[in-house]
Amino acid sequence: MSTTFTSGEESVESSIDHSQIPMDQEKVDGCLLSVDDEGYETPGKKLPPLVKHNKATAKDCNKKLPENGGSDVAMAEDDGYETGGKKQVLLKPKTGTAKEARKLRGSGSPRAEPSDRKSDRLDDKQLEKLLDEIFVERDSLTDSALHLLRLVPDGYVPLPHQVGGHRHIDGKLGFLRRIGQPHLLYKPVQFGSKGVREVSFYDALYGVSTHLGDPSIFPSLCNSSNNSLLQSILPMYHGLTTIADRAGHKCDHLILEDITHRFTHPCILDLKMGQRVWDDHAHPDKIERELKKYPAQERLGFRITGMRIYKPFTDDYVYYDRYYGRSVTEDTALSAITKFFEVGDGSHRTDVVNCIMDKLTEFINWMEKQNTLSLFATSLLIVYEGGPTPAAGDKQQTQVDIRLVDFAHTYEKERDDTQDANALFGVRNFTQYLEHFLKTAGQ
Ligand SMILES: Nc1ncnc2c1ncn2[C@@H]1O[C@H](COP(=O)(O)OP(=O)(O)OP(=O)(O)O)[C@@H](O)[C@H]1O
Ligand SMILES: O=P(O)(O)O[C@@H]1[C@H](O)[C@H](O)[C@@H](OP(=O)(O)O)[C@H](OP(=O)(O)O)[C@H]1O
């Protein structure tokens, strides 16, 4: 079995182990939100030992910047840390009893003691095992990625199906999955105001309060009694937790539903939406960077930030990264999108395209009505089951899920009488490509 990695410049073959992560569940308590019966981690569980780190200290990590106090400057540490948040962020009710609050905190939440022991890091054998679990070959990784992977917290693995965003295998602190909890993922809270904004968005939408969230950022959302439609197009949110890696860096993580977990062979496309992907408060340098990075964004209204497709005939995955996405122009967008539906035998998953079109119509209906939010740089995450193609006409068997993720640049509109034309343009344009595909390549 192999995964083909396709970048803007090159393709690399690598063998992968397709074994599954253990599925045993840990039942825990301590959450206000309704969760499914598989359970999830209670914030404040015992953490691995901590050591002081000379690059990104707990203090760095716990700094809370003022709103927009740094979102426009490059902040990534050279060891991949680009997260922020307060020391300990626990889900707690907006109004609730002391008993409820205690329950949410779990029993005690022990602080881990610092340790300088190198032995806490994964050794070569453990590293190989970890790489098997996330389908990655060691040869394809840089030293900084290997360094970060050796520090992956005990009991976690990097999210195996992450296609876009910051990832351990790119040498950035990426998403995690807790072993035995395949239905959840842990997204590191981003540094400074970006992280605070995203947490505040989820808090407001789900009517909860965390130490990091600021209700004043999304007042309308906080006061709305009907957020259920919006909730249904986002992953379920389960609050925050602090996770320490094997070197003792502590970072807050959003606990979110992993929307790929119901799929056996998830095919995933991450589209960053909008003609412009910077918000109204962006620094001119950021605007210049983005315009230079992907000039076609303005005309397309979306860009591919990652795409992974399962090929049932060869039992392997093909991966296209963000650099590939940035190489796509108006002239090649149709063929790039078509790749997402290629089965591998010359045929295409037109059943999936039809299903996506139906769901996107619902999205567009919602977006045409909503006049509260500006969703700058939000991603449309599209997932379908890449296992055997269902028999023709068996529409029920086509499994597709579409959600919005990434709210680090989401704002409430100051005037609430207009649509989010920026994001809407992108969704509509993508839908037009799909229509075109059905008329041409897909037939
Ligand atoms: N709820 C989810 N379920 C499954 N996968 C997810 C979910 N949220 C995010 N992902 C995975 O993580 C990737 C990155 O997500 P996201 O855009 O939130 O990260 P980010 O680090 O904020 O990205 P960026 O660097 O573009 O700001 C997605 O491409 C997807 O593969
Ligand atoms: O996925 P890509 O194509 O690599 O693009 C990055 C991604 O859009 C990040 O969300 C963004 O950080 P922000 O959330 O701060 O915008 C970063 O901007 P940056 O170049 O300003 O760091 C981009 O480089």
Image (cartoon, rainbow, N blue to C red):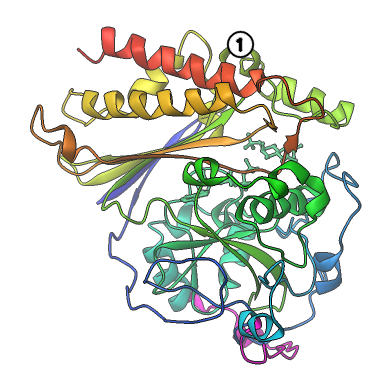
Q: Quadrant of residue 357?
A: top left
Residue 228 image point, x, y percent: 52, 46
Q: In this view of the protein, can residue 366 be seen by the observer?
A: yes
Q: Which residue is mark 1?
A: 299
Q: Where is 335 relative to 267, above or below?
A: above
Q: Secondary structure at mark 1?
A: helix
Q: Going by the image, does 285 lie left or right of 356? A: right
233 horizontally vs 439: left or right:
right
Q: Report the amino acid beneath label 1.
A: Arg
Percent x, y for residue 384? 31, 40
Is 243 situated above or below 13? below
The image quadrant where one finds the C terminus is top left
Q: Residue at x 47, y 29 (%)?
A: 363
Q: Which residues fall within the magenta stretch?
A: 105-124
* Residue at left offset 38%, top offset 30%: 359
Q: Check if residue 108 falls in the magenta segment.
A: yes
Q: Position of residue 105 (x, y in %)?
A: 66, 82
Q: Is residue 70 above or below residue 278?
A: below
Q: Is residue 339 left or right of residue 205?
A: left
